[in-house]
Amino acid sequence: MTVAIRQLSTSAPDFEAEFQRVLHWSAEQDHEIEERVAGILADVQRRGDAAVLEYTQRFDALQASSVAALELQPTELQSALHGIAPTQREALQAAARRVQAYHERQLEACGRSWSYRDEDGTLLGQKVTPLDRVGIYVPGGKAAYPSSVLMNAVPAKVAGVGEIVMVVPTPRGERNALVLAAAAVAGVDRVFTVGGAQAVGALAYGTATIPAVDKITGPGNAYVASAKRRVFGQIGIDMIAGPSEILVLADGSTPPDWVAMDLFSQAEHDELAQSILLCPDAAYIEKVREAIERLLPGMPRHAIIRASLEGRGALILTRTMGEACELSNRIAPEHLEVSSQEPHRWEPLLRHAGAIFLGAYTSESLGDYCAGPNHVLPTSGTARFSSPLGVYDFQKRTSIIEVSAAGAQTLGPIAAELAYGEGLQAHARAGEFRLNKGTAQ
């Protein structure tokens, strides 16, 4: 059966209209979900553990005598780590080392306190401190994601977070050994087998058993996303993520099968995922299309891939690679592959992307698991103004100001002038009291 994926050309008179149809994705909130989530959060805030236990039994079919019984002990995590196949254990540990090394570099670059004194002795600076406690949400319904454990917990550890609390749903009590092993490798402090909006509410408000956190990170379904949106402000969150995306910029030099599989790699997530190819070579686009037809039947998740490619995918013929870069910036994709013989020629033209993968050998999947940079990335065009998850998401910054007596003589009149202009006399007088007074009494 032919895959009915859109094929567009920037030279076509109707390109702009068709291009907008490709990009369109409705992020409108489902009002029924919003109402149910609001009720769950209010109930958790009011009844605490009792509500968490009730919803866990209802939604995950997981029976427990108490929420405390839903907390896994460190020995259980270590047992999971030692119980998985040695190849899996080695892969987890190797990935964790690379993720840690990358985020340690990130800490050196932007995660340190700093200060300086100006000519009159005034001290100015910034104090960077880690969050006390964070919660990480790890999906556990349709699939299990040990890589998400590493990508959320490792940078939190590198940042110096005091305590990491992980929540993960275990429907019918089925625990994924790789997820628990990843928690052991990443150094997660506490793990609760709770999921859904009730887990987000418990982390946000705190219960008798589950401690309140300062921030929640990690992906989840529509109920989790809605809950994170609603608790934001009382605590911090990382982002509200949309469907996964990949954009491949190709010059025709990469084997077509490689590019087809890269498009599959995001399409297999779910039907709303988006996979787009931009290329100035019409013959190459046809080869990729043929590769899609040939390879798709052999994919275990072929039905999901087909629905994704037909619903939101596109093969777009551009006039030049430069024009492809311009379109890429308009899309601002989550994952951007530059599958070219000269990737560094085009990279300076690319301003907006969650992560850029340079060269034919850099498949997006390597970034998902073990390259080192974080795989929690902005989606739905938000790469125009937001960044990947990083060490900085688990820190906060405090300004430091120590004005010298000489500095007060310089700054006082400036502040007073502006304060009087705003009609704030006390502000002005507070600055003026320190003028020509010598030392404080």
Image: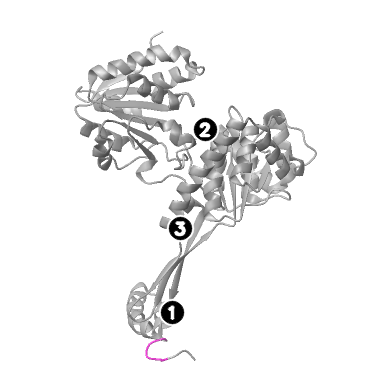
Q: Is residue 437 magenta?
A: yes
Q: Is residue 315 above or below residue 215?
A: above
Q: Are marks 2 and 1 in contact (CB under 8 Å)?
A: no
Tell which circle, 2 or 1, labels the residue nearer the N-terminal end: 2
Q: Residue furthest top?
A: 1
Residue designated by label 3: 111
Whole-percent x and y of residue 105?
Answer: 44, 52
Identity of the residue drawn at 45% across and 20% down: 305
Q: Amino acid at mark 1?
A: Ala
Q: Camera-side residue: 424 or 349? A: 349
Q: Which residue is mark 2?
A: 30
Q: Residue at x 78, y 41 (%)?
A: 66
Horizontally, is 263 left or right of 100 in the view? left
Q: Secondary structure at mark 1?
A: helix
Q: Is residue 71 left or right of residue 435?
A: right
Q: Which residues are magenta?
A: 434-438
**Amino acid marked by disc 3:** Gly
Q: Earlier in the sequence, mark 3 or mark 2?
A: 2
Q: Is residue 88 above or below residue 377?
A: above
How far apart marks 3 and 2 lie (CA) works out to 38 Å
Q: Residue 434: horizontal and vertical position, in percent?
A: 41, 86
The residue at 65%/40% (across/down) is 198
Q: Residue at x 32, y 21 (%)?
A: 255
Q: Quadrant of residue 184?
A: top right
Residue at mark 1: 426
Left or right relative to 178: residue 419: left
Residue type at tag 2: Asp
Residue 106 on image: x %, y %: 44, 52
For residue 334, side relative to residue 17 (left or right): right
Compared to 113, does 421 lie above or below?
below
Q: Quadrant of the N terminus?
A: top left
